[in-house]
Amino acid sequence: MKLQFGRTLIAAAVLSLSASASAFASDITGAGATFPYPVYAKWAEAYKAKTNIGMNYQSIGSGGGIKQIKAKTVDFGASDKPLTPEELEKYGLTQFPTVMGGVVPVINVDGIKEGQIKLTGAVLADIFMGKIKKWNDPAIAGLNKGVALPAGEITVVHRSDGSGTTFLFTNYLTKVSPEWKDKVGSEASVAWPVGTGGKGNEGVANFVKQIKGSIGYVEFAYAKQNKMNFAQLQNKDGVFVSPTEDNFKAAAANAQWDKAPGFYEILTDEPGKASWPITGATFILMHKSQASPAQAADVLKFFEWAYASGDNMALELDYIPMPDSVVKLIQGSWKANIKGTDGKAVY
């Protein structure tokens, strides 16, 4: 009787360990963009509560995410800078967008209310080039008549790491400032003419909050969560707009995902009176050939669930969900592109 009881205990222990190992093995790993981290974290928490499958996401910047997926150290990479169709082909990758959002200039200026300062793209570029050094510079004052601008120095804060948020920000500046385009350009990492570097959206947000007279750029969810002051921007139609869900949607409405090879679509400086000028999508990168089809299937199940059940969570954080028509295109790309080494579709 004691022997049987002991065997039962041993069997139960083995089953328990086996179940734990199975659950651990099913956890999925990703790394990259800080832009979507708030929504990915929220999705991961809800998904684990529903399925007991965890998602370990390292918010290390788009550059880091691209490096890790190329090295196959994670199940998926994440980047706000989409790879070109040529880059995808070169590295054997496929990509798909998850949500859209906005990058906003955030400021810490005494006596200035939220959204009170107006900036054009050209003036913003001159600030980040170090050409405009004081808050009461005539170029800023001319746009903000009646606003008591301080005479203090401007401290520029930018990203120190390779960043898709930087790519979107600098991509916009190249479209509104020929000098920026010629001297600095648009990349995930650029040679900044002036300023202090912060790691991740979190680092930039923290520096701007700490440094009086500073200006930086972050994804809107970080600005909102940290209750940061932002500047209005003049869009392509000449209208000064604030970063809002409706204004992100207005810019996102111009996306033509069905005509974008590899979902390569950039939404900066889009037309429309309501369009926020620094809008963009964030992307997931995966290898086309999967040595572990079951693990890849778990990743796709997570994003399938997120598309079906995560829209409200995204909207709460001021991200714009992908339209249902685009989700169908994305899931079609999974079937066509992501396969096991035997050539069979994972999804």
Image (spheres, helix red, strand yellow):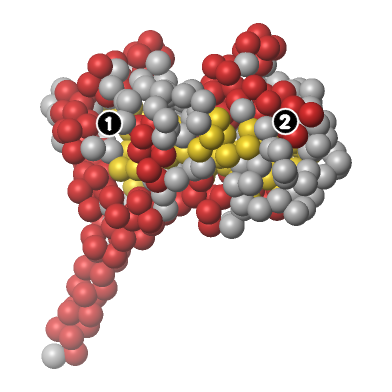
Q: Disc 2 residue type?
A: Gly
Q: Position of residue 329 (x, y in %)?
A: 19, 28
The tag on residue 142 is 2
Give whichever of 326, 301 is nearer the camera.
Answer: 326
Q: Is residue 330 above or below residue 180?
A: below
Q: Residue furthest bottom?
A: 1
The residue indicated by pointer 1 is 291
The image quadrant that residue 147 belongs to is: top right
Precedes in sequence: disc 2 or disc 1: 2
Left or right side of 45 for 237: right
Which residue sits at x=75%, y=54%? Answer: 111
Q: Nearer the viewer, mark 2 or mark 1?
A: 2
Q: CA distance from mark 2 to mark 1?
A: 60 Å
* Quadrant position of the C terminus in the picture: top left
Q: Is residue 342 above or below residue 317?
A: above
Q: Position of residue 189 (x, y in %)?
A: 62, 25
Q: Is residue 127 above or below residue 47?
A: above
Q: Disc 1 residue type?
A: Ala
Give whichever of 10, 41 is nearer the camera.
Answer: 41
Residue 204 in view (yes/no): no
Left or right side of 50 for 165: right
Residue 209 in view (yes/no): yes
Check disc 1 and report its element: helix, strand or loop: loop
